Image: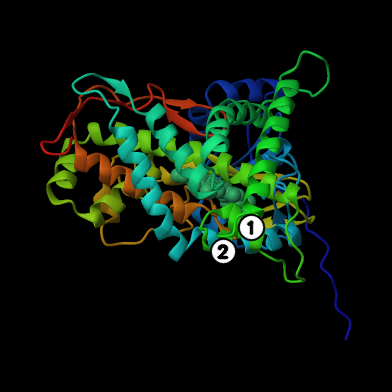
Amino acid sequence: MTTVTRPPGPVTLPPGPTAPRAVQGAYALTSPLRGLHRLRAKYGDAFTVNVPIFGRAVVISGAAEIKQLFMSGPDLVDNQEVNLGRVLGPRSLFALSGEDHRRQRKLLVPPFHGRRLAAYEKIVEEETVRELATWPEDRAFATLPSMMRITLNAILRAVFGAEGAEFAELRALLPPFVTLGSRLAVLPISKKGRLNPWRRFERLRREYDAIVDRLIAKARADDRLDDRDDVLALMLQSRYDDGSELSREEIADQLLTLLTAGHETTATTLAWAVERLRRHPGVLRELTGSGDSKLLNATILEVQRTRPVIDLTARQVKQDGFRLGRWTLPKGYVVLVSIALIHDDDALFPHAATFDPHRFAGARPDLYQWIPFGGGTRRCIGAAFATMEMTVVLRTLLREFTLVPTDEAGERWHSRGVAYAPAKGGRAIVRRREGTA
Ligand code: HEM
């Protein structure tokens, strides 16, 4: 029997703005979210843009197209060529595609689920209690720096297994390194020329590699390596299906990936949780009065729906004639899924602009519509870890403090490079509950 391969149909792209790339790029940089909302109002839930880094790209926010994209295999769509691997290293999960990506993911998923998560919960609670002890009473302050310290320390211990000198060195090195990396990942800055920020980035990377080498050497010499729960220890003991070990470079790139992807995203979501709760005293009262863990889960889901800290995730078309809904896209095209736009769709989330955790009470979200962690074969591998971490931090915070409500306007979205944070850092006024000092 002969099989007939159907030739790809003619390219059909959604409509979109016709302004030159530089103009669209400048607009995307200065007001990305407002721009996306305007384009959806004008063109509907799929439109074509032309911007630096991505080139001509299709932005989608319709539930059916997003589901179809996330369910398409890596032979049809996979990671985009220009990705965070530029800054995290060629072996980072973000940089890998196809079979290499699948192999690496298989080793990295187990540490973030089941029994391991319970072991990390204790670390998160310790770090939270330690940080909350420094909070001032009756005076407004930004909570984001605290959230960043909690999530950084938790990840350094849970992922790197770092203690002592290496812990202190990584704590000092990683924030400037990751901040610079986040900016370099999204800004079209050339690596050429002597006075460019890539030089500083490369110097910080060498320092990072030296610390990771020491951590690996210490772990290999550790008699109790088998009993350790940190991801570094698990990686050192993991074997691919053919029995080979992860290389030093793979371990270094992957640890940095986990930290970069996991630290700021979780901290900014927590700062948004504080920002949202202070503006919704009814929810705050219910949460503190009942200690209801289901309502706390629903609140976290609703914070992530209304304030997704990553607004876009990308895939690149790998075959000509890729059909997406009514459109046919050519190979090489980038498809950007707008997390912020689908979360704001009244047809999927009635009164979408209203913050109402009860919409999730007793119901699991549809994971192709509620997508703060992306979806499909590249869905965030830290989703369960992040949810555990946010639950522990908020539960501890509400147990130890009363969060004073406010009627101030909501904080604006502020782009930090990779993640969106509340512009004033999720300001809070707190009072310690009696008997918790
Ligand atoms: C609230 C916190 C977090 C948010 C909102 C978030 C969001 C995301 C999103 C949107 C993606 C892209 C998914 C896609 O393209 O479909 C992603 C990927 C990823 N995230 Fe997260 N993330 C969070 C926390 C974490 C944590 C705690 C870790 C690890 C400790 C982590 C590790 C990763 C990794 C490694 C990837 C790449 C997955 C792949 O390419 O296969 N994330 N995350």
Can the viewer see residue 19 in this picture?
A: yes
Q: Nearer the viewer, residue 302 or 113?
A: 113
Q: Which residue is mark 2?
A: 226
Residue 13 visible in image? no
Q: Position of residue 425 (x, y in %)?
A: 38, 25
Which amino acid type corresponds to the residue marked 2 in the rendered image? Asp
Quarter assignment of residue 423? top left
- Residue 58 coordinates in the image, percent (x, y): 65, 42
Q: CA distance from mark 2 to mark 1?
A: 11 Å
Task: Say whether residue 333 is left or right of residue 229.
Answer: right
Measuring 55% from the left and 29% from the top, which residue is drawn there? 175
**Residue pictured at 19% horizontal, 54% vertical:** 292
Q: Are marks 2 and 1 in contact (CB under 8 Å)?
A: no
Query: Which numbered disc, 2 or 1, marks the residue closer to the eye?
Result: 2
**Residue at x 77% of width, y 65% of height:** 244
User: Residue 249 bears which disc, if any?
Assistant: none
Percent position (x, y) of residue 74?
Answer: 71, 60
